[in-house]
C-alpha cells in the first residue's frame, strides 16, 4: 500500500467549520428507530444572540453548555479511492491498483460541552 495523500480543495480560509458536541451520558434511540439512524434528528441546538450559553433540547430534556476552543484542531476527512488499471490489457486477469486519498471536508476548532445533568421540561401531572 502506498502513501495516503490529504487534499484540501477549498483552502483553509474557506473550509467548512464543524464543532464537536460533548455530552455526559448516553443517547439511546427508541427501538422502532434502531435500524434507521441515518439523518435522524435527535434534538435542537440553540444559542441566544446575546449570550454564549448553548441549550440542547432532546425530547423532554434540556442541557446547558458552553463553547470551548480546542488546543489542536481536527480535520474532517472523506476517504476517496481511485482505481488505476495496470498496464496488462488482458481482460481475463484485469487487476487494478487502488490509490487512496483523503479529502478534507471540514475543520473542527471548537467543541460545545454539556457537562451538567439535563433539566426536565415536563413536570408530573396532578392526579384527579
Image (cartoon, helix red, strand yellow):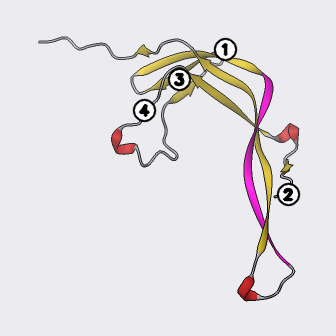
Residue drawn at (68%, 18%) of the image: 67
What span is colored magenta in the figure? Answer: 71-86
Q: Which residue is mark 1?
A: 52
Q: Is residue 95 above or below residue 13?
A: below
Sooner in the amino-acid sequence: mark 2 or mark 1: 2
Whether tag 4 and tag 3 are in contact, CB under 8 A, the answer is no
Query: Which comes before the other along the chain, label 2 or label 4?
Result: 2
Quarter of the image where one finds residue 89:
bottom right
Q: Residues within 10 Å of mark 1 (few under 14, many from 20)?
A: few
The secondary structure type at the circle numbered 3 is strand
Question: Can you give x and y, in whole percent of width and height, for residue 27 in the image?
Answer: 46, 29
Where does label 4 land, which residue?
28
Residue beneath the point at 66% across and 29% down: 20
Residue 22 falls in which quadrant of the image?
Answer: top right
Which residue position is annotated with label 2?
2
- Mark 2 and mark 4 residues within 8 Å of each other at the beta carbon: no
Q: Which of disc 3 and disc 4 is earlier in sequence?
A: 4
Discs 4/3, front: 4
> Could you give the CA–CA distance between mark 4 and mark 3, rounded to whole angstroms?
16 Å
CA–CA distance in space, label 3 to label 1: 13 Å
Percent position of residue 127, x then y: 15, 12
Numbered disc total: 4
Q: Earlier in the sequence, mark 2 or mark 3?
A: 2
Q: Mark 4 Cα within 10 Å, few/some/many (few <14, many 20+)? A: few
Q: Which residue is mark 3?
A: 56
Q: Nearer the viewer, residue 44 or 19?
A: 19
Q: Nearer the viewer, mark 2 or mark 1?
A: 2
Q: Residue at x 34, y 17 (%)?
A: 122
Instruction: Judge depth for marks 2 and 4 and give the one in front.
Output: 2
- Distance (Cα) linking label 2 and label 4: 40 Å
Q: Residue furthest left?
A: 128
Amino acid at each position: 500500500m502506498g502513501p495516503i495523500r490529504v487534499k484540501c480543495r477549498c483552502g483553509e480560509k474557506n473550509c467548512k467549520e464543524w464543532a464537536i458536541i460533548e455530552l455526559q451520558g448516553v443517547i439511546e434511540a427508541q427501538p422502532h428507530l434502531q435500524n434507521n439512524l441515518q439523518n435522524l434528528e435527535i434534538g435542537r441546538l440553540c444559542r441566544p444572540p446575546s449570550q454564549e450559553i448553548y441549550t440542547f433540547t432532546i425530547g423532554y430534556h434540556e442541557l446547558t453548555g458552553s463553547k470551548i476552543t480546542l488546543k489542536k484542531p481536527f480535520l474532517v476527512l472523506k476517504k476517496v479511492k481511485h482505481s488505476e488499471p495496470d498496464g496488462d490489457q488482458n481482460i481475463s486477469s484485469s487487476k487494478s491498483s487502488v490509490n487512496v486519498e483523503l479529502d478534507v471536508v471540514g475543520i473542527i476548532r471548537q467543541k460545545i460541552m454539556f457537562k451538567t445533568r439535563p433539566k426536565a421540561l415536563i413536570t408530573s401531572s396532578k392526579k384527579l
